[in-house]
Amino acid sequence: MKDRILVTGGTGYIGSHTVVELQNAGYEVVIVDNLSNSSADVVDNIEAVSGIRPAFEKLDCLDFAGLDGVFAKYPGIKAIIHFAASKAVGESVQKPLLYYRNNLVSLINLLELMPKYNVQGIVFSSSCTVYGQPDKLPVTEEAPIKKAESPYGNTKQINEEIIRDTVASGAPVSAILLRYFNPIGAHPSALLGELPNGVPQNLVPYIVQTAIGIREKLSIFGDDYNTPDGTCIRDYINVVDLAKAHVVAIARILEKKQKEKVEVFNIGTGHGLSVLQLVHAFEKATGVKLNYQIAPRRAGDIEQVWADPALANKELGWKAETNIEDTLRSAWNWQLKLRERGIQ
Ligand code: UDP
């Protein structure tokens, strides 16, 4: 029988790609999602890509009794990948309590239910934001955690601590915390991708919407940083590569290969790209000229960060594989497909 995995937030951007990769690797997936930032059609698209329809339950992870019911309805769930969370940095500053409630209570509910249903482990979506501006680059997992810049970032830090404290208390669960760098791109089929709500806050969604004419011009936030071309540097990781990191993390938990009950891995390429380099890579990959201007710095931006992914390479046997041009082309093809479908 296939091992059954619960994926919260499984119709979201990273979640949907991960569901497909789990299915490709032979797992049976149950999705829980409240559809607050995604739509039920994603389940159809997952099926169109993988050939397998995942079980889907529309549910908010704040609903403890509802979650309990999901574990009872799908017996034998072996592990959880927990994506479901509110993720808009700016909104979290406006509505901190909403963010603390959604992001903390959801995780607490899952951790409370895991022992009852003999769920062995949880893979948690964390973020390189926990490092703030690192003192040394590339940043390793050993780097100190810096004070969070936003309530959203703080929820990632607190959730890491909640997991550590729970495991340290002797709860019969283990965990892998994946600290993502900047996930971008879409599935090569162009059937799955990122669907931003309103005006995109992230760079690549803004680029593709500008390229197709939804936005007039990309604003590059600052060209006076202490970097070679003055624009900020990030480590852009292809979303399918990122999805595959979750699959190996799940296998590591189920095969009991963890060296510690809570492990942390950076999930990035190991290469930093500046905003201008990314814009030029997009133009080269797609042949589309991008309208952009230099604008003032955005409050709270980190100057430069990129991963040292050596630990994930060695321990998980995982490595980012897709080059930046293919990744940017996939984001563009996804945007073209959205237009074709009359969505955006
Ligand atoms: N950025 C930009 N214009 C935009 C959106 C983002 O210049 O419209 C820059 C942003 O300042 C940062 C980089 O692109 O240097 C990545 O930003 P994003 O919000 O995608 O990710 P972050 O690393 O901030 O989480």
Image: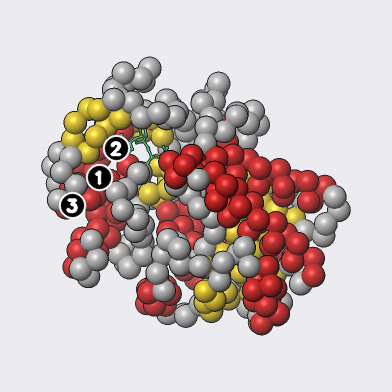
Please name the residue that numbered disc 3 is placed on: 214
Q: CA distance from mark 1 to mark 2?
A: 10 Å
Q: Is mark 1 within 8 Å of ligand 1?
A: yes
- Dividing the picture into quadrants, the one containing residue 25 is bottom right
Residue at 33%, 26% (x, y): give it.
Answer: 297
Q: Residues within 10 Å of mark 2 (few under 14, many from 20)?
A: many
Mark in the foreground, 3 or 2: 3
- Dividing the picture into quadrants, the one containing residue 174 is bottom right
Query: Which sits earlier in the primary sequence, circle 3 or circle 1?
Result: 1
**What's the residue type where badge 1 is placed?**
Ile
Residue at 68%, 68% (x, y): give it.
Answer: 64
The answer to whether residue 329 is seen in the rendering is: yes
**95 horizontally vs 61: left or right:** left
Query: Which sits earlier in the primary sequence, circle 3 or circle 2?
Result: 3
**What's the residue type where badge 2 is placed?**
Leu
Q: CA distance from mark 3 to mark 2?
A: 20 Å
Q: Secondary structure at mark 1?
A: helix
In the displayed structure, 86 sits above or below 16; it is: above
**What's the residue type where badge 3 is placed?**
Ile
In the displayed structure, 296 sits above or below 209; it is: above
Mark in the foreground, 1 or 2: 1
Residues at circles 3 and 1 in contact by the CB criterion of under 8 Å: no
- Residue 119 image position (x, y, % from top left): 74, 67
- Tag of residue 136: none
Q: CA distance from mark 3 to mark 1?
A: 10 Å
Residues at circles 1 and 2 in contact by the CB criterion of under 8 Å: yes
- Tag of residue 278: 2
Please name the residue that numbered disc 1 is placed on: 207
In the displayed structure, 107 sits above or below 229; it is: below
